[in-house]
Image (spheres, rainbow, N blue to C red):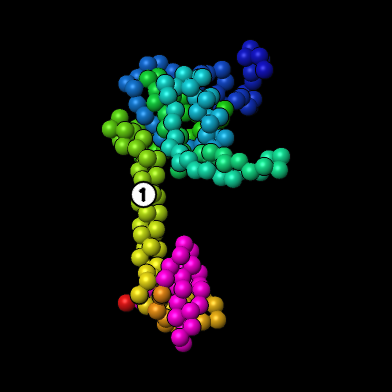
Amino acid sequence: MKYENIKIGDVLPLEGNRKPFGGSCVPSWFILNTGRQRRDMVAASAWLEFSGATDCWFPEEAFRRNVKRGGQVFRRKILKPIVPGVVFMLTDRLPVWDVLYARKNIRPMKVGERPLAISERVMAEMEQVPERITDLKREVLEAAEMARLAKIPQPGQSAEFMAGPFKGRIVVVEAVHGDEAIVLIEGFKVRSTLTSLEKRS
């Protein structure tokens, strides 16, 4: 629509020809809400940086998943956002929030009516979140493995059958070979998997 032909009652797009970022400002980090899928967050980050943002980032955790392709199984690295739909943006130019929303449905997280700006110190702590989560998961897995090993009976110890036809019976372990144990049941030596037994004091 030509501007010389605008009449009272005409509906114009809010952003018009305005840019997503205005004049210079103190460099600040903002918390933005975007689409919840990782591809939405990546696309929003790329568009913001192309449009004038200094940097965009969101915390992710990495894990491996088996993927079948051509009859073969591969281990593939998967990245998953820790907080879906939240992107952190650093800018030294004033964001024009209504333009960001109108063009890419990007909204700032607010305190009252003001977009929330966060300090470099808080961002430094946020950037450590993926590593902390990885460390925590490793600690949980190590603790679970230690708890599992603590339940495995050794030769000479008593153990209880937790599954199978002898479930609930207390026996004495004669020997352990790999994943198998030899136990005494009514004077007879019987082979059993260690997963079926749990140590008893």
Query: In the figure, is residue 82 to the left or right of 77?
Result: left
Circle 1 sits on which residue?
136
> Quarter-wise, where is residue 60 in the image?
top left
Q: Position of residue 153 (x, y in %)?
A: 38, 70
Q: Is residue 75 above or below residue 161?
A: above
Camera-nearest residue between 146 and 92: 146
Q: Position of residue 167 (x, y in %)?
A: 50, 81
Report how many numbered discs are placed on residues in the image.
1
> Does the magenta portion include 142?
no
Q: Residue at x 34, y 37 (%)?
A: 128
Camera-nearest residue between 5 and 13: 13
Give the residue type at disc 1.
Answer: Leu
The residue tagged with tag 1: helix, strand or loop? helix
Query: In the figure, is residue 75 to the left or right of 123?
Result: right
Q: Residue at x 40, y 67 (%)?
A: 152
Q: In this view of the protein, can residue 114 be seen by the observer?
A: no
Neighbor class of circle 1 (other Cα within 10 Å; few <14, some 14-19, many 20+) is few
Q: Residue at x 57, y 39 (%)?
A: 76
Residue located farthest toward the left when viewing the structure as drawn: 121
Quadrant in the picture for the N terminus = top right
Q: Is residue 114 above or below residue 162?
A: above
Q: Residue at x 36, y 29 (%)?
A: 29
Q: Position of residue 3 (x, y in %)?
A: 62, 14
Query: In the figure, is residue 79 to the left or right of 5?
Result: left
Dominant SS of magenta comes to strand
Camera-nearest residue between 49 and 8: 49
Quadrant in the picture for the C terminus = bottom left
Residue located farthest toward the right when viewing the structure as drawn: 70
> Does the magenta portion include 192?
yes
Q: Which residues are magenta?
A: 175-200
Q: In this view of the protein, can residue 190 be seen by the observer?
A: yes
Q: Position of residue 67 (x, y in %)?
A: 62, 43
